[in-house]
Image (cartoon, rainbow, N blue to C red):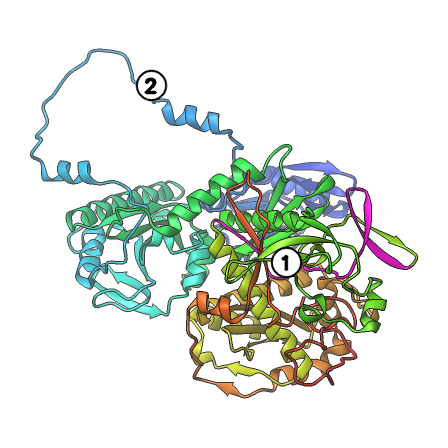
């Protein structure tokens, strides 16, 4: 760091003696070797914030060049700063998410909310107010709105809000030193009347808006820490300031003047919205650093406050109702002492613009579930629901024990029709080949027409209550052993607030896995989705990883039921290959979900690399991804991204009821009556089930025209 003669250093990190010299205490401890310790102690004793570098050098008898280098190093690593710029330290402390915070209970927060600041005691003087004041009426009617409608606002309304907020020609607010450091930025995520989507800056001197960049909706959700648009508002105003402007004249006090001015502008904006018949809500919890980078702001321009604006939605939105219900269920029923989940951990994944939540559940909290989202709370909800979903599939529920032949007059699932396995596969899996005289547990499901059907419980649950005897596995139920005939997976299981949504999510997961298995067995290169069909966020993320030498490819897998997108990321460095997939009637959502999965796998392996493994050792879903994350077998996948690029996409009849009937869907309700979440498993003999482990692919499935589909390597999907 270059230090000029006008630098007035002050020590901001405390130092203590250590074995190796000096240890400086802070967020990250810094240790200085013993050779320089005495000189450093001497230099720091002079760093009182009132003495400049020249005077410090004169007061020390050591080599001035070496001393100046040490001062530069101390400034570079943050041990000393210019005393007149200490406001930068405070600014770091007020950014979101906070590095240091109070861990308050609900009761403690309530006490703070209900308490009033004390008022001085003394003579009381009463006065009259003009109740007809227009300003008073605006203040009285103003309230923070956290639910906005889709009704569009106009460019003129937006412009007038900015004009009243900070028009410099009219001196809309007083400014310390007349320096006016404020900047207003505008984020438009849905086209409004007379203004398209994008990032804009308000020119407060010339009174117009300047569009400078296309908007990335997913990144904005992340920056506002929300799963949807902030309060469903399509337009956000951001108040920023050049924090070097007033501080150059007033030193650290200038930062206080800047904060005051931010508040004045925010007040103007909220009252302007009220006068125009639109609503607003201030938002302080922005991810400052990330959003400043997205808006490409200069180093001294810092964001302070966001405001959502628009028309109020008087009735709660379905999203809002769902989120509120979900929050209540998660905290009342699933997280806490003696509940399914004892603890969760939240991480910020800065490289992928989302939050990661990890849940610990099961016996001794030894099992882990994870999820990502642009909202920290929603990431937690998703990981908790995944844990609940998995826990329900492990709790074996049996409606009947006996042979298929004993189910007289009752329809049952034929395992060999739904999940046919070869004799070699059955032997390798160490299970028993099903026949109609084999006594096994059965669970009742329902067909699409509402009729009951009995399914072998092994196709519904994957309970860990198993035992191996004479080279074969047995399911334990009520202290009795029953031959295991199949290893079930979590594919086709989903949880949701209502049964229909859970069934729909589970079905699309089966469709996704079916398309992956058909692609893998046929080795037919899928089509590549053109960048012209991608949203701005995916384009931005592809460019981000491209600069790091990683290529992102969005594949459209062949399926006659819905869109199935498989996103893959390939590279010349570890991890060499990762993938994610999603199915559904909405192509944009499929692209986004599949990309999030692939990026989550990518960043997980970057920070937690895994050792190479042999194809014969592949057993778990994670093993499949681990195998191809290394270079050795990457060339066997090159056919996957050699398909043709498409700019037009097929259209599907978006009718889920018809889809259920066409798939002859079977559904099993796995819900817990005590918890208001629905968990279902779905099965269909029209769809090839995904399987995990070496040589476990279901190549004998009746819907495959040719049986010449044996594979020497496991599939790539994890």
Residue 260 in the image: above or below residue 688: above
Farthest top residue in view: 122
Q: Residue furthest right?
A: 470
Foreground tag (2 vs 1): 1
In the rendered image, residue 199, in percent from the top left (x then y), is placed at 34, 65
Name the one closer to the observer, 643 or 539: 643
Which residues, given as a range, are shown in magenta? Answer: 471-497
- Residue 705 sits in which quadrant? bottom right
Task: Classify 578 as above or below 121.
Answer: below
Q: CA distance from mark 2 to mark 1?
A: 76 Å
Residue 275 spot, x, y in % from top left: 15, 47
Residue at image location 9% in from the left, 23% down from the top: 128
Work out which residue is located at the far front of the displayed protein and give it.
Answer: 409
Dot 2: few (<14), some (14–19), or many (≥20) neighbours within 10 Å? few
Q: Position of residue 674 (x, y in %)?
A: 55, 38
Quadrant in the picture for the N terminus = bottom right
Q: Name the residue carrying label 2.
A: 118
Is 87 left, or right, of 35 in this rendering?
left
Q: Is residue 494 magenta?
A: yes
Q: Earlier in the sequence, mark 2 or mark 1?
A: 2
């Amino acid at each position: 760091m270059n230090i000029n003669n006008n630098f007035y250093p002050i020590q901001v990190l405390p130092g203590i003696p250590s074995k190796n010299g000096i240890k400086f205490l802070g967020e990250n401890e810094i240790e200085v070797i013993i050779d320089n310790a005495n000189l450093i102690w001497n230099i720091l004793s002079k760093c009182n914030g009132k003495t400049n570098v020249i005077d410090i050098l004169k007061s020390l008898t050591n080599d001035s060049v070496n001393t100046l280098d040490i001062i530069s190093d101390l400034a570079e690593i943050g041990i000393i700063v210019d005393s007149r710029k200490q406001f930068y330290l405070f600014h770091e402390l007020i950014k979101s998410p906070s590095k240091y915070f109070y861990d308050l209970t609900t009761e403690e927060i309530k006490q703070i909310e209900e308490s009033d600041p004390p008022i001085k005691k003394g003579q009381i003087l009463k006065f009259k107010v003009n109740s007809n004041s227009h300003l008073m009426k605006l203040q009285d009617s103003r309230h923070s709105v956290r639910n906005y409608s889709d009704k569009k606002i106009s460019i003129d309304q937006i412009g007038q809000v900015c004009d009243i907020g900070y028009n410099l020609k009219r001196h809309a607010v007083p400014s310390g030193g007349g320096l006016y450091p404020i900047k207003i930025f505008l984020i438009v995520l849905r086209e409004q009347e007379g203004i398209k989507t994008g990032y804009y800056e308000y020119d407060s001197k010339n009174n117009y808006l300047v569009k400078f960049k296309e908007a990335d909706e997913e990144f904005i959700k992340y920056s506002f820490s929300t799963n949807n648009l902030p309060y469903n508002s399509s337009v956000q105003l951001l108040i920023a300031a050049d924090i070097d402007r007033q501080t150059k004249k007033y030193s650290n006090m200038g930062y206080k003047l800047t904060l005051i001015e931010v508040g004045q502008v925010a007040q103007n904006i909220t009252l302007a919205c009220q006068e125009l018949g639109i609503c607003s809500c201030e938002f302080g919890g922005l991810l400052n650093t990330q959003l400043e980078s997205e808006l490409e702001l200069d180093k001294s321009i810092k964001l302070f406050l966001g405001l959502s604006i628009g028309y109020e939605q008087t009735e709660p939105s379905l999203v809002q109702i769902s989120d509120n219900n979900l929050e209540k269920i998660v905290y009342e029923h699933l997280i806490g002492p003696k509940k399914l989940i004892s603890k969760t951990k939240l991480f910020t994944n800065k490289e992928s613009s989302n939050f990661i939540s990890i849940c610990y559940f099961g016996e001794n909290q030894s099992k882990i579930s994870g999820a990502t989202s642009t909202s920290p709370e929603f990431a937690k909800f998703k990981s908790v629901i995944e844990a609940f979903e998995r826990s329900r599939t492990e709790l074996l529920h049996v409606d009947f024990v006996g042979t298929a032949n004993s189910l007289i007059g009752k329809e049952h699932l034929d395992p060999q029709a739904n999940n046919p396995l070869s004799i070699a596969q059955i032997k390798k899996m160490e299970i028993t080949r099903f026949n109609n005289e084999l006594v096994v547990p059965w669970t009742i499901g329902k067909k699409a027409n509402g009729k009951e059907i009995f399914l072998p419980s092994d196709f519904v649950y994957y309970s860990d209550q198993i035992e191996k005897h004479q080279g074969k596995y047995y399911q334990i139920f009520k202290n009795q052993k029953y031959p295991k005939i199949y290893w079930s997976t979590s594919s086709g299981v989903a949880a949701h607030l209502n049964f229909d949504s859970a069934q729909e999510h589970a079905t699309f997961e089966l469709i996704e896995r079916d398309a992956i298995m058909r692609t893998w067995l046929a080795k037919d290169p899928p089509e590549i989705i053109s960048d012209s069909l991608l949203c701005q966020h995916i384009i931005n993320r592809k460019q981000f990883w491209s600069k790091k030498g990683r290529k992102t490819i969005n594949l459209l897998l062949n399926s006659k039921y819905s869109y199935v997108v498989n996103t893959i990321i390939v590279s010349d460095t570890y991890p060499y290959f990762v993938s994610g997939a999603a199915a559904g009637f909405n192509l944009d959502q499929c692209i986004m979900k599949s990309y999030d999965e692939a990026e989550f796998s990518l960043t997980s392996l970057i920070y937690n690399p895994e050792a190479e493994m042999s194809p014969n050792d592949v057993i778990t879903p994670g093993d499949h991804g681990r195998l191809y994350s290394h270079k050795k077998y990457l060339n066997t996948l090159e056919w996957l991204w050699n398909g043709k690029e498409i700019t037009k996409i097929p259209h599907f009849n978006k009718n889920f009821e018809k889809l259920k009937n066409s798939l002859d869907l079977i559904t099993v309700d796995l819900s817990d009556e005590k918890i208001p979440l629905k968990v279902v498993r779905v099965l269909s003999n029209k769809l090839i089930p995904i399987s995990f482990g070496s040589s476990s692919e279901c190549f004998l499935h009746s819907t495959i025209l040719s049986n010449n589909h044996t594979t020497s390597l496991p599939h790539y999907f994890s």
